[in-house]
Amino acid sequence: MSEPTDLTAAQAARAIAAAELSADELFAAYHARACADRLNCFTWLPDEPAPSASGSSESGTGHTDAVRGVPLAVKDLFCTEGIPSQSGSKILEGYRPPYTATAVQRLQAAGAPLLGKTNQDEFAMGSSNENSAYGPVLNPWDPARVPGGSSGGSAAAVAAGLAPWALGTDTGGSIRQPAALCGIVGLKPTYGAVSRYGMIAFASSLDQAGPLTRDVTDAALMLRQMVGRDRRDATSLDFPGEIALPGAERLDGVRLGVPEELTGEGIEGGVLAAFQAGLAQAEALGATIESVRLPHAPHALSAYYIVAPAECSSNLARFDGVRYGLRVSDGGDLTGMYIDTRHDGFGAEVKRRVMLGTYVLSSGYYDAYYARAQRVRTKIVEDFAAAFAACDLIVTPTAPTIAFELGEKTGDPLAMYLNDFCTVPMSLAGIPAISIPCGLSGSERGLGPGGAGLPVGFQLAGPAFSETRLLDAAYALERAFAFDGSPVRARVGA
Amino acid sequence: MTDFEPVIGLEIHIQLATRTKMFCGCELSFGEPPNTRTCPVCLGLPGALPVANAQAVHFGLTIGLALGSKLAPRSIFHRKNYFYPDLPKGYQISQYDEPLCLGGNLGEVRIHRVHLEEDAAKLIHVGASGRIHASDASIVDFNRGGTPLAEIVTEPDLRSAEQAGEWLRLLRTTMRQLGVSDVNMEEGSLRCDANISLRPAGSTELGTKTELKNMNSFRFIERGIRAEIARQEKILGDGGKVIQETLHFDPSPNAHPPITSLRSKEEAHDYRYFPEPDLVPVAVDEQMLAAAAAALPELPAARAERFERELGLSADSARLLAFRLELGDYFERALAAEVDPPAPPQVLANWIAGDLLARLGDVEGAGGDPNQSRVAPEALAALSGMVAAKQVSVGAARQVLDRLLSEGGDPAAIVQAEGLAAMDGGDELAALVTAALAANADAAERVRSGNAKAIGPIVGYVMRETKGRADGGEVTRLVNEQLGI
């Protein structure tokens, strides 16, 4: 064994369980790397290089040893008791919640200590992590480029080896897209599989917590500690059966559906080439490739940018300066305090979406926008149901581009929104999807370390609660793709 | 001048007497120190989520059944968005176009809908005015925030302030009997707003309505509605137009005018209602329906109907007893007593509603609870039976009732001990009548010559002599007989 930080989470947990590695030593190693971070991945790190929270061993899940002692990086928007939880916003600067989010609590109860809180786009609104009040996160593959977003800090920290794994959230692609742009694994579970209690909400009907990890096994390992009904979240559900650790080596008999709508126009050439090379490898493993249709998928982004802003305009109303967080008042009246607080506390993208959402819910506009978007959403659900009659899993590129340059799209919100073109349909349908790195693109332009290119994500999606099948297929493909992220970890850590 | 007919509809909020709040596990507050019954959910902290209270849904269904509403198999919660410091999330979770209960009626008033929602927190304005404007500071107590409310909306079926007051009392009794709320206006567990409009008598079209708020007692409701009717009458009588607006009623005697505008329709909030994505629909299953049905006692309107139909009570007596739970219960306990001679229901009802309540100091339908008195229902039943069988006179029975009120006991024993038994119409009474005629010869002559009212002193003589034991009717009969009329 060279360095403890070279181990995946599963390997580290095994080493700790076998007493070959001490949890404190592992924590200290990651803490040191995180403290030396030059990518701006973290918004909070403990002062002491020792576990700040250790869980009890009496977790009921029966897998406690599988994560015990493996430090966990957690996206800023998860409430962590007594620890700043700011959702990347100035309006919550220094806010320390009195309770811990259920997803974090379950992982802590299974023995994963909190390594730090990770940077993100403000209130999870963004695809580049440039909307954080605490500065942008840099992509470890090329610090002139964005890591994706909104879970950019979580993705970059894992890719750079500053954390063994991280917790993120995905509303329209906020786990999968940064995972793709940083060359790691990111899984958005079925809506309702993981409790949202304690996640500072962006869009309630879409938000889901999920893992960002170095490999598929780690994603399964983290996910199975998190899932299950939580009586504090009315939309959470019992997970049917158990999430098994993946072990498939072949894809014999697995039908992979390639939707025309998400694999053609708008996808960058190099990304499409890497995706198609991935398909060929899947076929070599025994999978059959089917062409499927998702006729309403091209409308998904439009529907998403009505539903999500509508919900966020209401979810963010609580940030009014009355009880917690920022308050800006010149001693004038109540309305003045509301206006000044929200004017100074929210960033431009958040304001844009709050205004969009307020507009689409307004009297006289509701039917034309919100009600119509919900009908589109229903159509998309039906599209997926029809597609899954003809295939087992749907595959697409995760993002239409590789990591783009900082500032490249900040002046053009629509171009930024298009980066979620392939991930938003699954979010609207509430189905699980995983992104795994399938190769590099951009070498012809001399991009990336040594001009070898930048990572491309391969997305697999399945019907609701098909996580075990999804992870198994992703595991087989991961072995075939043999993507190697270790040089980046070694370089950043050096 | 045109006669106007008032058209009134009510919107009633009742705080449900659940153990915990509508969307969190905090226990309901009854005067605890401020902000001690709170949690991340009812404080609207970031990341907290609501979970609907099953007991509140059960109470809502019970109310719907009691009002004969259609219970929605599936209803949903909406968010009602607006900014105010007593609303920590920036929206109230309420129900909008898919409420728990639709339609129904209570008495002669139709119900439009019943839905569930959460109460706001309590704002206390520090400074001279007591209202938010011009106060030095406002402080918020979140103990009340999140208390479950049922909002009951009527159709515009009421026609006067008095009718509104009477109907609201019926509603209060009904809710109290259901056990779903304390329904106390002074404590705010029953709140009522009124939608009021006028139209020319005979017209079937509705006029422009106003919404009147802040009537926090039964007295103020009737006064407030009367004041608003008068205000609209003046406007329309002068040829003006009523403006649709929300009005505030100030009950203090030096409030001139008592009714002021809160906001007009133009300033009305756009609440941007949309389905609450943090909650799942309320799906009512057979089990929930059965539980609500099982929780349903006999309600005042049905009880009054039964009193009339089965016991032959007059409509007035039946309503008076049935619409006040404690009177109805007392009446039925008395009726169940095995007394000989038996008490006819109407006689018993008259004794409860008349002499007994008057002696209990009952004022405006409040205060007198015979269950709390020393008069056992069995005793009143026995007394009523004796009166009906003419074993005691009404006058003597009143004396017995006074004794029962001060000491309790058995009326037959009191009659025995005090010698209050009615005299039968035998020789003893006839002799007393003869003596009375002799002692009041002038009066006897006037009666004989056709002045029936002159009989008073003669009957009074007999009553004095018998200490009220004689039956007035029998005395009159004997007087007439002896005078040859």
Image (cartoon, rainbow, N blue to C red):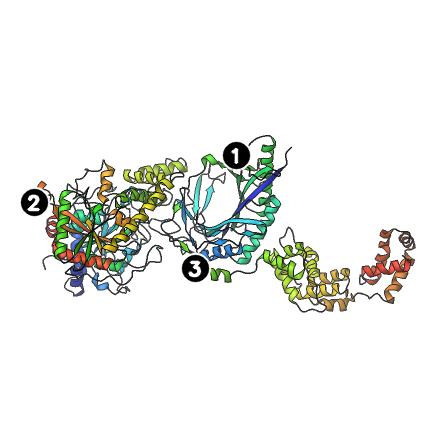
Residue B243: give its label: 1
Check whether the beta carbons of the residues at disc 1 and disc 3 lie within 8 A of each other: no
Q: Is label 2 in a helix, a strand or a loop?
A: helix
Tell me the distance, in whole angstroms, between the alpha carbons under discs 1 and 3: 45 Å
Residue A395: give its label: none
- Please state the chain letter of the residue tagged with numbered disc 1 in the rendered image: B
Q: Residue at x 44, y 40 (%)?
A: B137
Q: Position of residue B323 (x, y in %)?
A: 61, 55
Tag 2 residue: A450
Amino acid at circle 3: Asp
- Please state the chain letter of the residue tagged with numbered disc 3 in the rendered image: B
User: Is residue A239 visible in this depiction of the protein?
Assistant: yes
In the current view of this chain or complex, which residue is farthest to the left? A450
Q: Position of residue A187 (x, y in %)?
A: 22, 53
Tell me the distance, in whole angstroms, between the alpha carbons under discs 2 and 3: 64 Å
Q: Is label 3 in a helix, a strand or a loop?
A: loop
Whether residue B51 is situated above or below residue A357 in the rendered picture: below
Amino acid at circle 2: Gly
Tell me the distance, in whole angstroms, between the alpha carbons under discs 1 and 2: 75 Å
Within 10 Å of disc 1 (Cα), the crowding (few <14, some 14-19, many 20+) is few
Q: Position of residue A33 (x, y in %)?
A: 15, 51
Q: Marks 1 and 3: which is nearer the front?
A: 3
Q: Marks 2 and 3: which is nearer the front?
A: 3
Res B87 → quadrant: top left
Within 10 Å of disc 2 (Cα), the crowding (few <14, some 14-19, many 20+) is few
Closer to us: A226 or B295: B295
Asked whether, in this view, residue B405 is left or right of residue A3, the answer is right
Q: Residue at x 25, y 38 (%)?
A: A413
Tag 3 residue: B285
